[in-house]
């Protein structure tokens, strides 16, 4: 019997580390995984969906809940059912807060809420935002619900500061995905 191809839903949010999502897609595909990208509306301000479509070989789902569909399937439910794992990389403080509060106001947050699969979150943000008590509380809450996190690294941040908040190394993210699957 042939082994079922595994589907990764890659949620991409509006962090300057978005460019690393390109390499994440390449490496996941090299592992034989199917990658389906869901971009938030804000992420589309930083990189065009055509880049992710070219790298993944699949349609890119945009932040709109009610975009024109090819079939009768409801996008967030269909994506949630398809997911063997949802990876959010880079994950902003905003998406982490939404998930912790149960806010479902875009395609990515609704897909995560509807999913029964594991969720892996790779934060990327300014050190002050990452260390903020509310952000840390949201992370703790999501961990208590079974969400997995891969901690950000320390390095030069987009704001010019050196601190914790850099997206984890792509190789570490891919290694964690393979471990979960």
Image: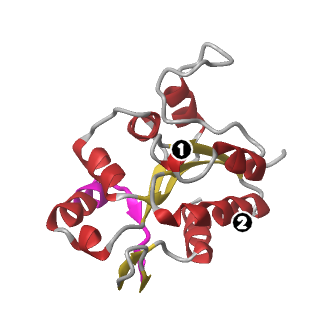
Q: Quadrant of the N terminus?
A: top right
> Between residues 178 and 107, which one lies in front from this camera angle?
107
Q: Where in the figure is residue 10, as x and y percent of width and height?
A: 57, 50
Closer to the observer: label 2 or label 1?
A: 1
Would residue 93 appear left or right of 174 to someone viewing this image? Answer: left
In reply to whether residue 159 is colored magenta, the answer given is: no
Q: Where in the figure is residue 18, as x and y percent of width and height?
A: 54, 60
In this view, the residue farthest toward the top is 72
Q: Report whether residue 6 is seen.
A: no
Give residue 42's quadrant in the image: top left
Question: Label 1 belongs to which residue?
Answer: 39
In this view, the residue farthest toward the right is 1
Q: Quadrant of the C terminus?
A: bottom right
**On screen, 123 above or below 112?**
below
* Badge 2 vs badge 1, beta-carbon distance below 8 Å: no
Mark 1, secondary structure of its residue = strand
Would residue 98 appear left or right of 118 to someone viewing this image? Answer: left
Give residue 37's quadrant in the image: top right
Magenta range: 141-154
> Between residues 116 and 35, which one lies in front from this camera angle?
35
Q: Where in the figure is residue 168, as x and y percent of width and height?
A: 49, 75
- What residue is drawn where x is 31% and y is 58%? 93
Question: How far, Cα to Cα, is label 2 from label 1?
Answer: 19 Å
| Residue 27 marker | 2
Would residue 164 appear left or right of 46 to someone viewing this image? Answer: left
Q: Residues within 10 Å of mark 1 (few under 14, many from 20)?
A: many
Q: Where in the figure is residue 8, as x and y percent of width and height?
A: 61, 49
Total of numbered circles in the picture?
2
């Amino acid at each position: 019997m042939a082994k079922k191809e595994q589907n990764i839903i890659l949620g991409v949010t509006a962090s300057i580390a978005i460019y690393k999502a390109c390499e994440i897609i390449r490496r996941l595909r090299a592992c034989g995984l199917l990658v389906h990208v869901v971009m938030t509306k804000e992420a589309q301000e930083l990189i065009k969906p055509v880049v992710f479509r070219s790298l993944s070989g699949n349609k890119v789902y945009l932040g709109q809940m009610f975009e024109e569909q090819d079939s009768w399937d409801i996008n967030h439910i269909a994506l949630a059912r398809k997911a063997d794992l949802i990876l959010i990389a880079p994950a902003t403080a905003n998406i982490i807060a939404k998930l912790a509060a149960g806010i479902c106001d875009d395609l990515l947050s609704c897909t995560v809420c509807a999913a029964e699969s594991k969720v892996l979150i790779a934060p990327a943000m300014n050190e002050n935002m990452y260390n903020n008590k509310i952000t840390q509380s949201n992370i703790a809450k999501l961990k208590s619900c079974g969400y997995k996190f891969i901690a950000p690294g320390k390095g030069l941040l987009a704001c010019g500061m050196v601190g914790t908040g850099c997206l984890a190394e792509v190789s570490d993210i891919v290694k964690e995905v393979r471990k979960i699957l």
